[in-house]
Image (cartoon, helix red, strand yellow):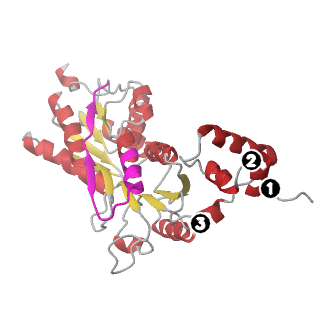
Amino acid sequence: MNKRVTLRTIADDLGITVATASLALRRHPRISPETTQRVEQAAARLGYIYNRAAANLRQTRSNLVAVCVSDLSNPVFNEFLVYIEDELREHQMQVFLGIAREDLAVQRHFLQTALEQGVGGIVLLPVRGTTRADLSALLPEGQIDPVVPTVVVSRALMDVALPQFVNDDQLAGRLAAQCLIDHGHQHIVWVGGGQQTSTAQNRLLGVQQALSAAGLPQAEILHGPTSRQFGHQSARALLTRDNPPSGVVCFSDLIAFGMITGCQELGKLPGRDISIIGCDDMEEAHLTFPPLTTIAVEKAEIGRRASRRLLAPLTGQDIVVLPPKLVLRETVGPPAQDR
């Protein structure tokens, strides 16, 4: 049986101390890049396997970060995840990923498991309907600070005293509705999903605020799941009416993608026969036909700033709200009767 390769094996092979070999494998700044490279090459050549669990026991804080994502069936959360993981990796942190599938029980179980694994921090993209009681593993009753550093991303939690990094969703709704108003639309419908989330509630509120300020009737509301299928069904339902709306604000790009397909199946062209605006500015938004007008959420900045805040030695709550911006493409134009 082959003898297990240890730090001593590497140190003896290179003629260095065990401490130097250990620091080099952790890429400690005290060790020169040249020595670090030699140690890493020797470790690979000799077949050394780094015992991360043992190393974590020797450190005051694990380099493992749990990222709990509410639902990856919506690609916008995957985009958030990419920016979060990029920033954490830059700081030599490793991601322990959990997908909660919009299920509070799954989220609770993952958070408990993450804590049992000794993670050094948690990034939470919360499941809809999350309250403080659902985070009892992180925030035991009567405790102000979480048991490990934790940040919340994307959806605000009003009754939870944790650092939060979110989009200004009321502004997003106002920008979307104002875009349609500026193009002459008066009969506007909201096609929304996620109505239990702060994101959807605030975007709808922003839409209604813009319509009120313009002296227009409040938007009709269609609620459903955040999916292409719901957008597709909504397009067919709205466009087959005797008096269809001239403009639609979609809660998300994902719903808007489905609406574009539904319109095309009915022989209608978005931007000409009906105006459609989404929200999120997902990567796919500029590739639809026609390209989707949308409200761009600063996903990269939100993800990166949340990750940096997680790594900072601070406690207490701060809510960082980042403003979105309008991206005008081709699915918005004047009402058909005005052409």
Residue 230: mark: none
Visible residue check, residue 74 = no
- In the orientation shown, which residue stands out farthest toward the bottom? 142
Residue 290 appears at what percent x and percent y?
Answer: 38, 24
Q: What kind of element bears circle 3?
A: helix
Visible residue check, residue 220 = yes
Q: Earlier in the sequence, mark 2 or mark 3?
A: 2
Marks 1/2: CA–CA distance:
9 Å
Q: Which residue is drawn at 32% across and 23% down?
A: 330
- Identified by mark 3, the residue type is Arg
Closer to the camera in the image, 337 or 247: 247
Q: Which region shows up in magenta?
A: 304-329
- Name the residue carrying label 3: 58
Closer to the camera in the image, 306 or 194: 306
Disc 2 and disc 3 in contact, CB within 8 angstroms: no
Residue 300 appears at what percent x and percent y?
Answer: 39, 40
- Name the residue carrying label 2: 43
Disc 1 and disc 2 in contact, CB within 8 angstroms: yes
Marks 3/1: CA–CA distance:
20 Å
Q: In which quarter of the image is the C terminus?
A: top left
- Name the residue carrying label 1: 5
Q: In this view, does 194 lie to the left or right of 17?
A: left
Q: Quadrant of the N terminus?
A: bottom right
Q: What kind of element bears circle 2?
A: helix
